[in-house]
Image: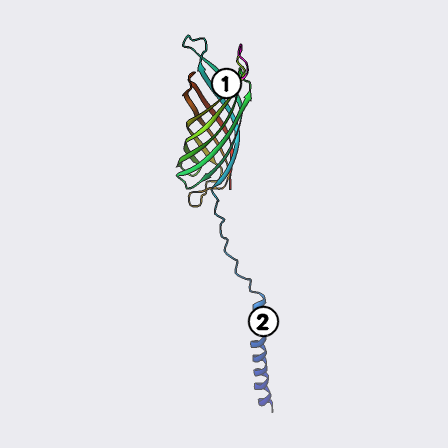
Amino acid sequence: MKKTIRPSAGIGLLVTALAVGPVQAGKNVSPAPSPVVPVAPLGLYVGAGLVANLFSRDCPCGDGSRIHDNDYGGVFRLGYNWSRYLGFEGRLIYAPWEKDFMDFLYGGLYLKPQMEVGDHVVFYGLLGYGRNHLSCDCPGHPHHTHDVWAPAAGVGAEYFFDGTRYDGKRQGWSIWADVVNTMYDKGSDNFRNNVVSAGVNYHF
């Protein structure tokens, strides 16, 4: 009688272990983590900064000398990096501070060739066209304005705090500085203008 009971009890324990074991084991298995897919940068960026505007023109006195007016203000930038080698940018500049005789307002569009140096630094050029609006209060002359459309060209550098990139595009904050000539020997008085600027960008 004992020989019959022992195998039956063993079989019952085996069946119970097989039924309960997988259930208990399943409770301790953590789900596999989902892979993190990086969000690709858009290439779009915005920026702002301060400018020093350096203007000169032939002196109305007719002696061949030039007069100068250095004024200061701000710049707003909106751009798009097509790739690590090429971008497009628009700028709006207003420089009314510390003027001698002229307020300066400017808007321009640029093609922006770029060259990366290491993971953080980009050198770039600016080739474009823009409108120079000069609001003048010259001594001995009534208030008058000039609107001068002219080619523009410049060079600059940008430093990215985040050195990573995705297909040549970046995200996050950067700082930049550049100089742009917005007109050269334009009009009968040979207007010339250079803008030195520096500021911050945020790349989306």
The residue located at (57%, 76%) in the rendering is 19
Where is residue 65 shown, x and y percent of the image? 42, 10
Tag 2 near tag 1, CB within 8 Å: no
Which numbered disc, 2 or 1, marks the residue that appears first in the sequence? 2
Work out whether 15 lies above or below 99. below
Which residue is identified by label 2?
23
Work out whether 93 lies above or below 9. above
Q: Is residue 173 magenta?
A: no
Which label number is shown at residue 70?
A: 1
Element assignment for label 1: strand
Where is residue 194 shown, x and y percent of the image? 45, 22
Task: Please report the bounds of the magenta region as a residue range.
Answer: 139-143
Q: How crowded is mark 1: few (under 14 residues within 10 Å), some or many (20 or more)?
A: many
Residue type at tag 2: Val
How is colour applied across the structure in the image? rainbow
The residue located at (45%, 17%) in the rendering is 56
Q: How crowded is mark 2: few (under 14 residues within 10 Å), some or many (20 or more)?
A: few
The residue located at (49%, 31%) in the rendering is 91
Q: In which quarter of the image is residue 192?
A: top left
Residue type at tag 1: Asn
**Overall secondary structure of the magenta section:** loop
Q: Along the line of sight, which residue is nearer the eye, 30 or 146?
A: 146
Where is residue 20 shown, x and y percent of the image? 59, 74
Q: Quadrant of residue 57?
A: top left
Q: Along the line of sight, which residue is nearer the eye, 140 or 157?
A: 140
Element assignment for label 2: helix
For the residues labelled 2 and 1, the Cα–Cα distance comes to: 81 Å
In front of the other: label 2 or label 1?
A: 1
